[in-house]
Amino acid sequence: MQPVSPEPTPKPAAPADLEIKDAQLIFNHVWKELEAEYGRENLRFPKELILLGGAPGAGKGTNTDFIRELRGITAEPIVVSALLDSPEAQKLKSQGGMVGDREVVGILIRKLLEPEQQNGAILDGFPRTKVQVECLKMLFDEMMRLRRDFADTPDAAHFKQPIFHIMVLFVDESESVARQLKRGKEVLEHNEEVRRSGLGDLWEERATDFDARLARNRYKVFKEKTYDALVSLKEIFHYHFINAQASLELVQENIVRELEYQSSLELDPRTYDLLRRLPVASEIIRYARQDLVRRLDGYKVEHPELMQSVVDFIERKMMPIIVRHAISGRADINSENKLFHDPIALAILIDIFSERGFHATVDLHHIEIPDHFDLQTGQIQCRVKKVFRFNVRFKGSEIRRG
């Protein structure tokens, strides 16, 4: 009798595999409950979701109202940590830890179905784990499926193209800990005044805001779990981290730019596929200076005489006029110089002004001028005069008046 070889012991699943399977189980369970509770035709989600994440103390709360105003969102932000008020959740949060994914996903999706969220919602603090990221991807897929299923029905208007914007604010550990402790001090002072005067509402007192060790632990949790989860979002959503250690004004400027960059997410997929061949403005300006220098050097090598003529024209004919308009920062100059019948000369002029810090544009106008009148036929023959109208703009002078 041949000996029977023992069956190989199955290898344990990799943590990532288990994580994704857990996400599928969690989401499928939540989604089935929603379909049974609300009915599929009533699963109407906000037309826009802004996912506001970042390191502890990065300024999520500080910038929420700014983002709401930018996007015209009237609903109060959904602060995920505030949705989880069970004693177990409070204990875990007080130690700098995190609440279970099943609870977070279930509560959050139900919150998104509330009527006041339909014009747009801001999620403060979601997603924070890779499981939540996977659930978010599945939510996006389900929203797309709902859109397709109801496309030709009277309810189609309630199932628009899902718009997801990702805003992730980042600060380093030392800045995070300092801001958490500063916030704790401000909370204590505020609450002391509320208790003394009886006016106002008490602010939440979080243990992590009063203990440097717990504050560092909270940041460590962010780096070890949330950071990687947010990075994995880039697989389907295009976004950049925003440096939140800069001034508030600069941070908000970066938020505006990031929302503009992500605007392609607002398009229907068919429209986006049509437009994606065109470069985004941020891609063009990234190397604009290098391209400008290369063009100017090219003119000097390939068209030296033409470039010299353009420089002479700017110096003699245009700069005296521009100098006189230094206060307004705008000069309009007309010219009939045949130099500019060559389109390369126009390109050289515009690039020279750009290199010098001006913004120049040109319009070509064709003006018909009577040149000959035929007495027998009464016909008027005209010649065409080309007039180049240059507009040069720059930052005008700021004059103080007493």
Image (cartoon, rainbow, N blue to C red):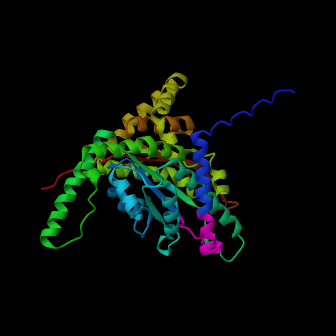
Task: Name the residue at 41% across, 35% down.
Answer: 355
Image position of 354 with respect to 372: above or below: above
Q: Is residue 217 left or right of residue 42?
A: left
Quadrant hosting residue 174 = top left
Image position of 187 with respect to 331: above or below: below
Where is residue 362? Give x, y as percent: 49, 46
Task: Name the residue at 59% across, 58% down.
Answer: 27
Where is residue 13? Give x, y as percent: 62, 40
Where is residue 16? Give x, y as percent: 58, 42
User: Quarter holding the N terminus?
Assistant: top right
Q: Front-most of 39 and 16?
A: 16
Q: Front-most of 161 and 378?
A: 161
Magenta-drawn stretch contains 41: yes
Where is residue 293? Give x, y as percent: 46, 29
User: Quarter holding the C terminus?
Assistant: bottom left
Q: In this view, does 380 lie to the left or right of 355?
A: right
Quadrant hosting residue 201 = bottom left
Magenta-drawn stretch contains 141: no
Q: Front-most of 212 and 380?
A: 212
Part of the protein shown in magenta: 30-47
Task: Name the residue at 52% across, 41% down.
Answer: 283
Q: Which residue lies furthest to the bottom in this view?
A: 154
One can see residue 368 in this view: no
Q: Residue furthest right?
A: 1
Q: Is the magenta stretch mostly helix, strand or loop?
A: helix
Quadrant hosting residue 343 = top right
Q: Residue furthest front?
A: 1
